[in-house]
């Protein structure tokens, strides 16, 4: 489960990488057609997900219901082919290979 008020200021890089891997794993399973139970367990009640731009999925989504609705819409628009992949995290030192 993600910390309720996650802040990068005091977070160890290894913790951030683990949390992101868990989130991406749950998202990828959901985007491939799985249920949202694992994602629900990772999202705080206070989650806010912002998608910039002016397009079909842009906007600010507040709370698990709206965020999961956004994830479902993105999954459906991508024909269940969308996948999340980490590039880097803005915590700790430097860019490190995800694999």
Image: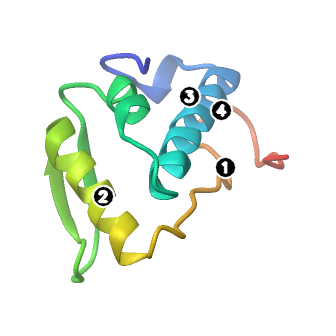
Q: Are marks 4 and 2 in contact (CB under 8 Å)?
A: no
What residue is rendered at 76% in x and 49% in y? 95
What residue is rendered at 59% in x and 29% in y? 16
Q: Are marks 4 and 1 in contact (CB under 8 Å)?
A: no
Q: Position of residue 92 (x, y in %)?
A: 67, 31
Q: Which residue is mark 1?
A: 88
SS category of the residue bearing label 3: helix
**Label disc, if present, on residue 17 of the rendered structure:** 4
Q: Which residue is mark 3?
A: 19
Tell me the CA gap for discs 2 and 1.
25 Å
Q: Nearer the viewer, mark 4 or mark 2?
A: 2
Q: Which residue is mark 2?
A: 72
Tell me the CA gap for discs 3 and 4.
6 Å
Tell me the CA gap for discs 4 and 2.
24 Å
Q: Is residue 79 above or below residue 84?
A: below
- Dot 4, crowdedness within 10 Å: few (<14), some or many (≥20)? some
Q: Nearer the viewer, mark 2 or mark 1?
A: 2
């Amino acid at each position: 489960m993600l910390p309720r008020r996650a802040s990068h200021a005091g977070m160890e890089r290894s913790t951030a990488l683990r949390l992101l891997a868990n989130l991406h794993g749950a998202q990828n399973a959901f985007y491939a057609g799985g249920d949202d139970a694992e994602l629900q367990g990772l999202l705080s009640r206070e989650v806010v997900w912002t998608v910039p731009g002016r397009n079909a999925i842009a906007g600010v989504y507040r709370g698990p219901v709206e965020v999961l609705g956004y994830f479902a819409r993105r999954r459906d628009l991508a024909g269940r082919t969308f996948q999340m992949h980490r590039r880097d995290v803005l915590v700790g030192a430097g860019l490190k290979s995800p694999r």
